[in-house]
Image: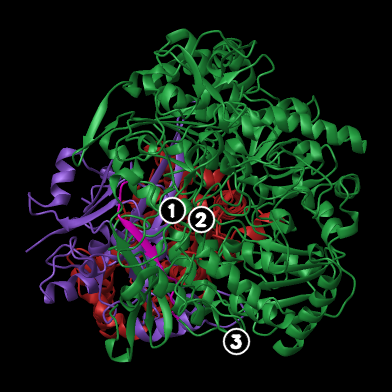
Chain colours: A red, B green, C purple
Amino acid sequence: MKQQNELEKIMFHPTGSDLKPYEWMMRPTRQREWIDDKGIFLWLAFFFSEIGAGLYFVSLFYEYRAGIVLGWLITLILGGLIHVLYLGNPLRAWRMIMKPKTSELSRGIWIIGVFAALGFLQIITSGGFNMVFNCIMGILCLLIISHGFATMNVIRALPAWSSTMVLPLSLISGIWVGSQLLQMMFVLGGSSALASGMEVWSEAFFLIYLLCILLYVWGTFHANEIGKTSIDVQLNGELSKIFYAGVGGLGLVLPAVLTLIMWGGDTHGFLIFLRLVFVLAGDLAIRYTIMKSAVYKPLI
Amino acid sequence: MTYKTDEILEDKWVNTTCGVCYCGCAARVRVVNGVPVKIEGIKESTMGGTGAGLCGKGIAGLMYYHDPNRIKKPLRRTNPEKGFGVDPKWKEIEWEEALEEISTRMKKIMEDNPNKILFTNQTMRASDGPHNHLYFYAKAFGIPNNGNFIIGGGSLHCGNAAHMLGGLIHGAWSIAPDWRYTKYVLKWGSSKGTGSGHSAMTNARLRADSVRRGIKEIVFDPMGNFAGGKATQWVPILPGTDTAVGLAMANYILNIRGEIDELYLRAKTNFVYLIREDGTFIRDEKTDKPLVFDERAKKIKVFDDESIAFEDFALEGDFEHNGEKCRPCFMALKEHLKQFTPEWASKISTVPVGTILEVAKGWVDNAQIGSTITIEGQTFPFRPVSSVTFRGSQGHSNGIHQVASIDLISQLVGAEDVPGGTMGWPSIRRKYPGGEYERLPKVGKDGVIVPSVFYSHDPWPVHAPSYPCTNSGCVEFWSHSTLSHIPYVKEKEYIQEKFGVEKVKPEMIFGIAVNFLISNSDWDVALENFKDCFVVLSDIWVNETDQAIGDIILPDTSYLEKDTWSSEIDSFFFNGSPSYEDWYVHLQNPVAKPVGESRDFMNVYLDVANRVGVLDKYHELLNGYYSITDEKLKLKPGEVLTWKEIGERVLKWVYGDDKEKIQKQGFATWHKPIEDVYWRWNMPTRCPVYMEFLIHDRRAAEKIMKDTGFELEMDMDQYAPLPDWFWPTSHKELDDEYDLLAFSYRDVLHTNNSTFQNPLIDEVSQMSPYTFTITLNKGLADKKGFKDGDIIWMENKYGTKENGIVKTMEAQHPKVLGVCGQGGLWADRRPIAKGKGSNFCKLLPSYLRHYDPITGNIETSVAVKIYKG
Amino acid sequence: MPRWGMVIDVKRCIACWGCTIACKEEHFLPPRVFFNRVLIGETGKFPTSSKLIYPILCNHCTDAACVEACPTGATYIREDGIVVVDDDKCVGCRACLVSCPYQQRTYYDQKVKEREYYPGQGKTEMELIGEKLYPLKVGTVIKCNFCSERVDEGLKKGLTPGTDDVATPACVIACPVGARVFGDLSDPESEVSRLIMEKKGKQLRKEFGTEPAVYYID
């Protein structure tokens, strides 16, 4: 955010953005509730739900119980708890199941509920990894992965969120991050063969992930004037540092370098760990910039 | 979200009068459990906006009561040093101590010369009160005229020229379009109907209806904001050059198009008076009345000879009287106007020739000269064109010529105080049925209207400049200043010495704090001129003036706590509805108990008058002011009454048996006859459009200047009977370095600077793009390398500078900078106001040459250079 | 059943902010919380540019994005078209707030509640009584409710909203230039319907597709 000059500080109450109070909704105006102040919880909540479900999802393919347990816990305990912390009236959180017909948020709660119950069943039953169960859980995982961005995606008022590439990007990033987590778990669990075998998937998902980000940026930029403004804020505006360092550097360039080093399955535990750290940071960064850069169209 | 009605123990609405600006709109306040919580207008009253509407700042007025920064006890300065940035080291003292000190000092001064006491006058009413009473309060102290007032608030930026002409032409303080019937309105640097000016919301309501009706509104203004932004057509113009366009239009009407209301000019103006070669009137030897030529009788007669029919007054012709050649002064006008071509006016004003011609054509086309209208069975001339001006265009060193040329346009087509035309505020105030107080204008010398009430200095009859002067305002010399400018002038001491005032050097200032130090011109000059006085001010806060030079600050009640029964009784000539609407006269009822130990300044004034020994004199003056003849109601010698107790008597006199009813409902209403509204043709007066008195004034003034060796620069050519073009001082100071003109304007949200301390107004001011910023034309900003949000410095030729935040706009003349008045505040005890906006006033140089030599109006535009901060 | 709506005459409006401030007093709103605002801008180029003034408030949309987004049903459209928030049901997720393309909602949290009109100087009597008379619930979203308290109370007394002051939204009666008209959009004879027809009333940013009940005429 641009530094207010000394006169502005005295005359105008800070608006939380570059805008002065008289520019509110007269120039593209940034959404604040879902990222600023306590809104930062929502960013974390979406992130944890996504990576937890991602891990669960990828673990299903390996029928890896530790993976689904950890994924289940991350989604519900970290994702769920932080979600509730964000709410103004957490004790009433149960009310959010009331409107699945129209509210994406409400639908998300239902999905999480079903995921929690069925996931628990899958974890505790010895024959939990059967085709049907896996399919159902797989679908639930994908829904949860995309829940955060789907909630944002339905908001027509914010073109940067309702862009068509938001959902694919979210799905791919969830699976990508989930796969990285699982790979790390394999390393930690001493299954280096599995970890190495997964690398081919990592390569593929990384490339798709990269493509999705490029498509998101390109698509949103060209969708309409307001989408363009949002991308402009990310690339040239107040978020450019986070975008280039976080999304570009941590999320793409460094994982790319590490992926190239390990190309063909020549994996290394520490490098996988490093890549995971970068990927997590990069994922947080892309989520942050998308949430923070969404602007409303001026009213006149 | 619902109301907890069970928490409400008492819920009432109190009718009162708004006190946030000088307009005095009807207002009612909701008081719940003793706490004022909401303000609205009064639906039943036409004093103000549509229905129960009231403007934003009026509604926000609540905060004057709730502000924790209100002074609760009298304050005494303990640090003898005065000045900006000096801590006065206030000490709270008891009322008795304060009043004793004040009256002891006053008595001592009065033994010497009462003219050594200056009184302040207010043009805003945050603390409000009976504004008129201050003038004759001063008289009770033995101070003869208006020279001992320091004008604050709106200061000399508004008024002197506009009020002088309003008084001379309409017998009223100001002018407005007859919104109800007009079709074509020209506004010159005035925001009448769009939020400012007198009766602001009354006019806004009437204007809104008339724009819906489809009138054309053309606004000449450097900025397309309040007035220009709402106009049918905004015409960007350089500040202070309206005269040029006005004169070119007058030339078009009279000489090019040749369509004028001859009958009106013959019957209602002094253009028929015969002048000799030097321009002065030929007067009848016996009666001293100006002479006219009766075309039917082919005879020269006195102007008010009843044997002459209106159509027989000669407008043209060469005559001879007692061997002296003479002609109607209309001929002088006709010749005089020929020099003012649209091309010439365009060069000065930057208004395109085509626009000038188009507007002038629209004016004549819409004037419907010769037409009549019948309203309620009465027939009047119908002239649905109106040309109005106020603060913006009149606030220049050529102010009187600005307003006179703008008025001339209406004169030529007879659009004065007739349906659709240019209206004065009510000049006739008939008595309330069953009451006694009545104010009727008189026909004065030379047939000129003498206003029934006028504040401070009567515009007519005029007095030629004389000396020695008896007070610091030197009003004997500046005989047309409504309120004197001299207290602010840089060369004050030189002037006072030349005009023999040095013996009455002011020693004390007593009055209402209107922040006069920072609201007129160069702050340092004002500080220098006032700091040696013992300054006693009544205020609700400690404002900048209080902090810099106040010795004793008395806690005043805000308008929400006052019982100002008198507030509107006599202010009809600037506050009543100028339209054909019934009379509504409001009382100011207290809606809450006084904050802390605050006291209504009027009670303090009475107390001081009693201690000083002039209370009986004041009572006598008050009896005279309201012309009370009923012995029972008269204020008697020896009586000591509160302001409320005095009100009980006066209201009985004014409203008779309905007094109680009116007090209860908070206002009086009665019918205003239509002939009192459109009075022009019912009153045998003539507009002194040919200001012949200025020729005599010039001679007298020049003689005094010669006799006293007075050498300061004054544009004596301005003492001319016909409106003429004179460059404003600010334009003369433009050069390659100081290449822009800064000007200020009124924002609908603010009344001078008191409103800056109101948090409800402050937060919406921040949402208003031009209120706290300095505006400049987008193209100009690009050229100078400025963009929105930059810090900009404006500096005048005398090294005074002010900074602010840039806001670019398209709708601004590319050679000007716009600042909304009186921000840039710094008083420590007004934390909301502190640092908000920019202060324009300090940039105005205060040399005598920056004032209108005739009216004392200050030049309100200034040549500046700008640079980045 | 009526369908309440509003017509704002921007030709009349002089941007005095009366609506904004009256609304704040009516609902005892804390600093920097607005149910009514005025947007001021300009269009065109010098010297033919013109000033734009748009008073804005909740549009009480027929296809309200906020209602759709609300997961609890706290935000709903009453039968008379007024969009309200039931603060007993609101969980404070702010999906409504983020969804509103007109940005007419405010999240009322502890920080907002603690704001003082005179910062650091304590709350005034007006702010304190406001908290008692018109308590806003922390952790919920608040918004313009077309002064439904006035409308409902007025109807109970047999008054007509839009005609009788006490039954009409505070911003409407506060307007000193009569720029606001409130009434029943479902009644073709009502003044609002007539003005929309005659003056070709336009909704602000119709392209958002939420079908506002606030119309502007010029």
Residue B749 tag number:
2
Q: Which residue is mark 3?
A: B596
**Amino acid found under the numbered disc labelled 1:** Cys
What is the spatial separation of the Cα atoms under label 1 and label 2, in whole angstroms? Answer: 7 Å
Quarter in which the N terminus of chain B is drawn:
bottom left
Residue C16 tag number:
1
Crowd band around label 1 with a 10 angstrom C-alpha radius: few (<14), some (14–19), many (20+): many
| In the foreground, B138 or A253 | B138
Using the image, name the chain to which the residue with label 3 belongs. Answer: B
* Quadrant hosting residue B609: bottom right
Give SS at disc 3.
Answer: loop
What is the spatial separation of the Cα atoms under label 2 and label 3, in whole angstroms? Answer: 28 Å
Q: Residue A280: percent from the left, percent from the top?
A: 52, 63
Q: Which residues are magenta?
A: B580-591
Q: Is residue B383 visible?
A: yes
Which one is in front in this view, the residue at disc 3 or the one at disc 1? Answer: 3
Q: Do discs 3 and 1 belong to a common subunit?
A: no
Task: Check if residue B241 falls in the magenta segment.
Answer: no
| In the foreground, A72 or B435 | B435
Q: Is residue B479 above or below residue B565?
A: above
**Amino acid found under the numbered disc labelled 2:** Leu
The residue drawn where x is 64% and y is 47% is: B482
Crowd band around label 2 with a 10 angstrom C-alpha radius: few (<14), some (14–19), many (20+): many
Quarter in which the C terminus of chain B is drawn:
top right
Give SS at disc 1.
Answer: loop
What is the spatial separation of the Cα atoms under label 3 and label 1, in whole angstroms? Answer: 32 Å
Q: Residue B163: percent from the left, percent from the top?
A: 57, 44
Q: Are marks 1 and 2 in contact (CB under 8 Å)?
A: yes
* Quadrant hosting residue A120: bottom left
Q: Do discs 2 and 3 belong to a common subunit?
A: yes
Q: Residue C188: percent from the left, percent from the top?
A: 7, 49
Using the image, name the chain to which the residue with label 1 belongs. Answer: C
